Every structure is written in structure tokens, then in C-alpha cells.
Image (cartoon, rainbow, N blue to C red):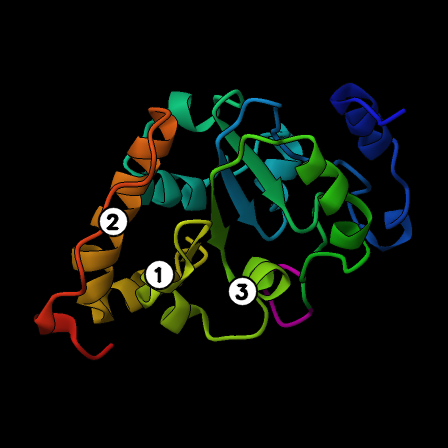
Amino acid sequence: MSETLEELLNAIRACQTCAAHLPLGPRPVLHVSRTARLLIASQAPGTRVHETGQSFNDASGDRLRGWMGIDRATFYDASRIALVPMGLCYPGRLPQGGDCPPRPECAPQWRARIMAQMPDIRLTLVVGSYAQQHILGKGRVSERCLDFRRYLPRYFPLPHPSWRTGAWERRTPRFGADVLPALRACVQAILAGEDLPDIPPLSPAFSSP
């Protein structure tokens, strides 16, 4: 007999696979349901997310919601939007600063089982380098984000919405003028239960990244 979503979540909450490597201990953070149509695949929780148990409950979440054009209530409606990072627990800090990568044990152990519980996913926002490497293979995040049409209708690659991305946004007007309108149109369509809209071709003004 296949496992239920409740059984899977209980197993995830009881996981101790990476416990010895987690400075704050295991606290898996994910938001899933059988009815979600949109999946946000990201990297790993930060300290605030670990403390609150709520994904993207920080400034990066505010930026991501702004990119998507939705409010907090919609973002955290698990019946419509699933939030599943590559590493479910906070991985700690690097010696030189910044968060550690997601623990490598996590996605191979859990991701396929989680995805099997979400048959209605129609679009996955692939957020940041770790998620993109796992799902899409090796490649440059910035190039993938600007070439998002290549990955539709299944995936929409995005940079990680950290404060560091702000400088890249300012240097890359195409992100705001071309990528974000398409992202918002896709998100609204999926949340409305519709097919993805037709995305206009790239403007000649942005013929080169």
C-alpha cells in the first residue's frame, strides 16, 4: 500500500538523517497539499524560517512575493501553492558568511516521495542555483532566468530573492521588463485553474542578455 501524505509528513518530521550536521537541530519546513497546482522549489530554510516554521518568512520572501505579484495569504495557501526546498532543514552558516548549501542527503531521500503526493502541480518555480542544479542540471542562474521561455510550460527558473539579487536586478532591466510580467501572468493563470498564457516573444530591444 502506498503511503499517505500524512504518513510521509510524519516520517519527514521524525527524520534524523542530517541531525549531526545541523547546528540548530532538525526542523523540516515545507508546505504541501494534494491539490496544489504551483510549486516553489527553493534551496533551504534560513534562521528566521527555522524559528517560525514558515517558508520564506523573511525579506527574501517579501521580494519573491513581489516578483510573483501575490500577497502573503495567497502565498501561504498550501491548497494552491506548495513550498518545498531542496534541503528541508536549516543547514548552518559558512565560515566566510552566508548559509551553507542544502544538505546533500535531503533531496534524494525525500523529494520524489513528496512529488508523488502532489499530482496536480502544473508549474514549478525553480528558485536559486541549488534548486536549478538539482532539477535542471548545471547552468548559469542568470542566463536561465532570462531564457525562461525555454523551460516553460513545466518550469520557470528564478534567481534566489536575497538582498544580493537587488544589484543584479538593477543591472538587468530585462528581468523587470520581460521576465516578471511573464512570471506574474503564469502564476495568475495557474492559481486560477487555467492553462499557461501565451507568452509574447522576446522584444527586439532585449535580443541579447
- For marks 3 and 2, the one nearer the N-term is 3
Q: Amino acid at mark 2?
A: Ala
- Amino acid type, residue under disc 3 in the picture: Ser
Q: Nearer the viewer, mark 3 or mark 2?
A: 2
The quadrant in which the C terminus is found is: bottom left
Q: Main secondary structure of the magenta part?
A: loop
On the image, the x and y values in percent for residue 10 come to: 83, 25
SS category of the residue bearing label 2: helix
In front: 42, or 151?
A: 151
Q: Quadrant of residue 72?
A: top left
| Image vertical order of residue 202 relative to residue 75, above or below | below
Where is mark 3, residue-wise? 129
| Label annotation for residue 148 | 1
Q: Earlier in the sequence, mark 3 or mark 1?
A: 3
Question: Helix, strand, or loop for circle 1?
Answer: helix
Quadrant where the N terminus is found in the figure: top right
